[in-house]
Amino acid sequence: MTVEVKIGVQNAARELHVETEESSEAVSAALSEALAADSGVFSLTDAKGKVTLVPVAKLAYVEIGRSVSGQVGFRS
């Protein structure tokens, strides 16, 4: 299962979309660790192995959710 992460960056018109194989708990833990550091950097590796780095001082928001790509039909 992939997890979709949307990252809002201050003074940027568009948000970053990253789909990762990491669990939502692992993403949340990495974000918490980066926020706790004085000059932390939030690092996230996507499903294809690309690394996205964002300085936590520039984060506007981070939305963590389950990806629905490849899903067919409706879920209830």
Image (spheres, rainbow, N blue to C red):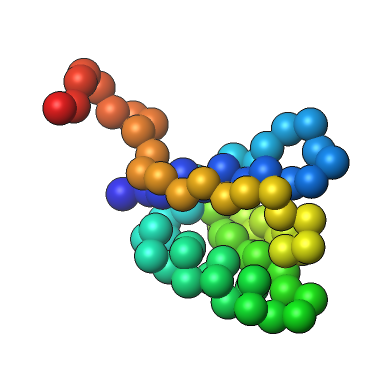
Residue 73 image offset from top left, x and y in percent = 21, 19
In the picture, measured across the screen, residue 74 lies left or right of residue 41, that is: left
Report if residue 48 is visible in the image.
no
User: 73 or 9: nearer the eye?
Assistant: 9
User: 70 or 54: nearer the eye?
Assistant: 54
Query: What residue is rendered at 38% in x and 39% in y?
Result: 67
Residue 62 image offset from top left, x and y in percent = 57, 50
Given the current orientation, which residue lies at the most extreme right position?
11
Total count of labels: 0
Query: What residue is rendered at 73% in x and 32% in y?
Result: 14
User: 65 or 10: nearer the eye?
Assistant: 10
Given the current orientation, which residue lies at the most extreme left position?
76
Query: What residue is rendered at 20% in x and 20% in y?
Result: 74
In the picture, measured across the screen, residue 13 lies left or right of residue 66, that is: right
Residue 58 image offset from top left, x and y in percent = 78, 56
Query: What residue is rendered at 15% in x and 27% in y?
Result: 76
Against 76, residue 61 (above or below) is: below
Quarter of the image holding residue 59?
Answer: bottom right
Report if residue 3 is visible in the image.
yes
User: 57 or 53: nearer the eye?
Assistant: 57
Quarter of the image holding residue 38?
Answer: bottom right
Given the current orientation, which residue lies at the most extreme bottom position?
37
Against 51, residue 64 (above or below) is: above
